[in-house]
Image (cartoon, rainbow, N blue to C red):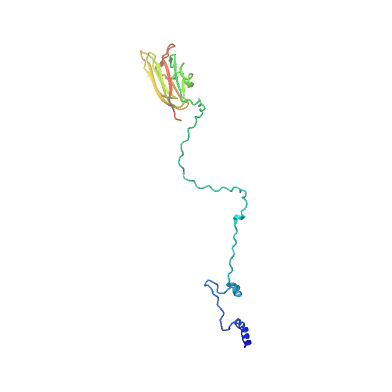
């Protein structure tokens, strides 16, 4: 009896290790997102697949590996200019500067003055139909603008001028003069023959251009034309001066 019991106990482990043909193989648990066919590695080693291997992440402390500070790199290329910003507020007024030096003197040729006053001490009888009245006495002749030899004023400063001529008539003789602007008569000074000699005067203003001429002309007609003067007193004068220069 004892032998039979020992035989049964020895056969039980063998019987439990043989799979039953009628019992179906166990099904693996699968998620809906898993592939339909299990990978070969999983089928060949089901036990290894069941036990998940934990992942190992390596962490390196960079502060431990930090080296010495390197040299400074080269300067990079400048970038493009940005957009212009809004205008800033006006700053405070600065301190007053020091007084500058005096400038150089102006050009002496650019004069803005012109005047003359001349006279005649000798009487004159006209011998031609047209005759220039010349003068022998100078009172004022600024910058020599009046030509004593020709008896003419030449304009070197364009502008507005005032002119005046004074004469003394001769008894019983006609006095007939024109104040001329270049070759054109501007005003007349006239006195009829008379028993009395008198002083006559004429004035005018003219707008002169550069190199214009102003002079006094005697005009002879049928009767004798004459002006009176003597060596003691001056009876005949011709005057002119610049009133306002032209705007440059």
| Residue 28 vertical placement versus 166 (above, below) | below
Q: Which residue lies furthest to the left in this view?
A: 195
The number of numbered discs placed on residues in the rendered structure image is 0
Q: Does residue 127 appear in the picture of this structure?
A: no
Q: Does residue 203 appear in the picture of this structure?
A: yes
1 or 135: nearer the eye? 1
Name which quarter of the figure residue 130 lies in. top left
Q: Position of residue 112 (x, y in %)?
A: 46, 25
Q: Residue furthest top?
A: 232
| Residue 105 vertical placement versus 63 (above, below) | above
124 or 220: nearer the eye? 124
Looking at the rendered image, the quarter that the N terminus falls into is bottom right
Q: Which residue is drawn at 40% across and 23% down?
A: 204
**In the rendered view, does 108 fall on the left or right side of 169?**
right
| Residue 62 vertical placement versus 205 (above, below) | below
| Residue 227 vertical placement versus 160 (above, below) | above
Q: Which residue lies furthest to the bottom in this view?
A: 1
**In the rendered view, does 26 fall on the left or right side of 157?**
right
Q: Where is residue 185 in the image (x, y as percent from the top left)?
A: 41, 24
**In the rendered view, does 141 fall on the left or right side of 42?**
left
Name which quarter of the figure residue 10 lies in. bottom right
84 or 4: nearer the eye? 4
Q: Where is residue 174 in the image (x, y as percent from the top left)?
A: 38, 16
């Amino acid at each position: 009896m004892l032998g039979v019991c020992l035989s049964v106990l020895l056969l039980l482990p063998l019987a439990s290790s043989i799979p039953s043909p009628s019992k179906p193989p166990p099904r693996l648990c699968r998620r809906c997102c898993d592939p339909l066919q299990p990978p070969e590695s999983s089928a060949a080693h089901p036990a290894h697949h069941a036990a998940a291997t934990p992942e190992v992440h390596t962490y390196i402390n960079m502060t431990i590996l930090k080296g010495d500070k390197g040299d400074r790199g080269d300067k990079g290329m400048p970038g493009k200019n940005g957009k212009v910003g809004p205008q800033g507020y006006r700053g405070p007024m600065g301190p007053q500067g020091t007084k500058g030096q005096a400038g150089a003197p102006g050009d002496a040729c650019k004069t803005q003055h012109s005047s003359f006053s001349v006279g005649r001490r000798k009487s004159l009888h006209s011998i031609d139909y047209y005759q220039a009245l010349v003068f022998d006495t100078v009172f004022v002749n600024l910058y020599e603008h009046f030509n004593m030899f020709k008896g003419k004023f030449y304009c070197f400063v364009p502008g507005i001028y005032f002119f005046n001529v004074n004469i003394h008539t001769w008894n019983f003789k006609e006095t007939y003069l024109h104040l001329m602007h270049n070759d054109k008569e501007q005003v007349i000074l006239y006195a009829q023959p008379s028993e009395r000699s008198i002083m006559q005067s004429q004035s005018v203003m003219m707008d002169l251009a550069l190199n214009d001429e102003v002079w006094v002309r005697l005009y002879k007609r049928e009767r004798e034309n004459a002006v009176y003067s003597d060596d003691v007193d001056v009876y005949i004068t011709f005057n002119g001066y610049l009133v306002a220069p032209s705007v440059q």
